[in-house]
Amino acid sequence: MTPFRRHACHYPLRGLNDSTIYQFRVCAVNQAVVGRPSKDTEPVNTTDPLEHTRTMVIKVDRGREITITKDQLESQMKVPFPPTGVHACEVSDNYAVLSWTEPVPRGKEQLTFYVEGSIAGKNSWQLASMDITVGSPRFPMFNLQKGKSYYFRVRSFNKYGVSESSEPSLPISLGQPQAAPAPATSVFAIRDTDSAVLLQWQVPVEKEGILGYYLYYSEAGKQEWRTINNKPTTHTKFTVHGLKSKKECVFRVESVGRAGNSIYSNESPPILVKAVLVAPSPSTAIALLLCTGSGMILTWRVPANNGGDPVRSYYLDQKDKELDSWRNVNTKPAKERQHKSAVPTSFKMATIVPVPKKAKVCNLDRGHYYQFCVFAANVVGVGKPSEPSEAFLYEEWTMPEPDNLAVYGSQAALMTWNSGR
């Protein structure tokens, strides 16, 4: 465990072994106790970041490949050359990260580095890397004094010896403490499903340094805030799942930066968690119920999903099988079921079936085949069309009609008819 005192949510580590897989976690500390550790990070492999620049893949016959290193192409050398370009690639209010360029040629032997530092104006160089093996051209410097400037230089080292020192860096001093980022604005939620909403917000005007956002929710009026995401999201939209249906919820957002987290944003307006209203799904099972001298009577099943609002009406399109174009059957919505109300005293058979919708289509040409599709509509609008029906031949049926279609509720009907004589 490495204790450090700071409010920023980042920290450079040094002294790690090369080509080793690590995982990390963080504990928060206050005056009372050390908090529980965070979740483990994903595994991190400490590979040499410049290794890919020193390797070359050569394709040979029969699809084989040979990997060679740049070191193998260099001439034999003993004591290495010094690094170049020492500079600070990152500066905060309590540390600085040094970076430099490896010597060229690098040599075949394993290469490490020594880092030396001196307070500006004193020319008193001391080993800054101490007993830490520096295997890559990057090194964080801690314990620097605020208000003072430092020079740094680097030496290369292999089994044959130590190089001359590099040219000193420019003066390096600690930066000013970073301010926490500004909070997000305009937080609001949009209905999605019975247990989810789409949360949206706007990036603050001062957006520099923002790494992501944490999201929170509470039931309206309770102020019992719960964290939505364990990792900061970098987007300004997020679908929040797992909410209780028919409960009013409010949301807030926290910006995340290197210097810490922002204050909370203003709460979103309360939103009732329920499915968003959409147009109905397509109807199904279009069938020809009756064909008379005045037209066809069609039937179909209600949509499987009414879109959160009862189906208010239906619209029909038709086309002649021999033609490509569809035309409207009704411009006014079809709303009512058609059925006879008289109940016969005798019947051969009675069957309970789900109640479909019905419509009569007139002005058809005898002997022609027709296809139909149905659109269901609710308060939102008209849904997508059904699949086209099979082609129905328009010819008057001569069989007897059913005597009665008696409706029971909204889901079933009782059809009855007399036996033939």
Image (spheres, helix red, strand yellow):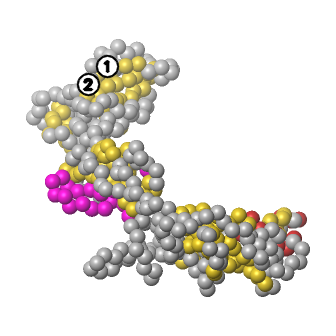
Read off the residue under disc 1.
Answer: 330
Total marks shown come to 2
As drawn, 30 above or below 413: below
Residue at point 41%, 19% (across, down): 327
| Magenta segment includes 259 | no
| Magenta segment includes 224 | yes
The reply to whether callout 1 and callout 2 are in contact (CB within 8 Å) is yes
As drawn, 162 above or below 190: below
Q: Is residue 414 visible?
A: no
Q: Which mark is residue 334?
A: 2
Residue at point 87%, 71% (across, down): 74
* Res. 82 image quadrant: bottom right
* Res. 177 image quadrant: bottom left
Label 2 Cα neighbours within 10 Å, binned few <14 / some 14-19 / many ≥20 = some
Residue 132 percent across, percent down from the top left: 61, 83
The alpha-carbon separation of the residues under discs 1 and 2 comes to: 7 Å
Q: Secondary structure at mark 2?
A: loop
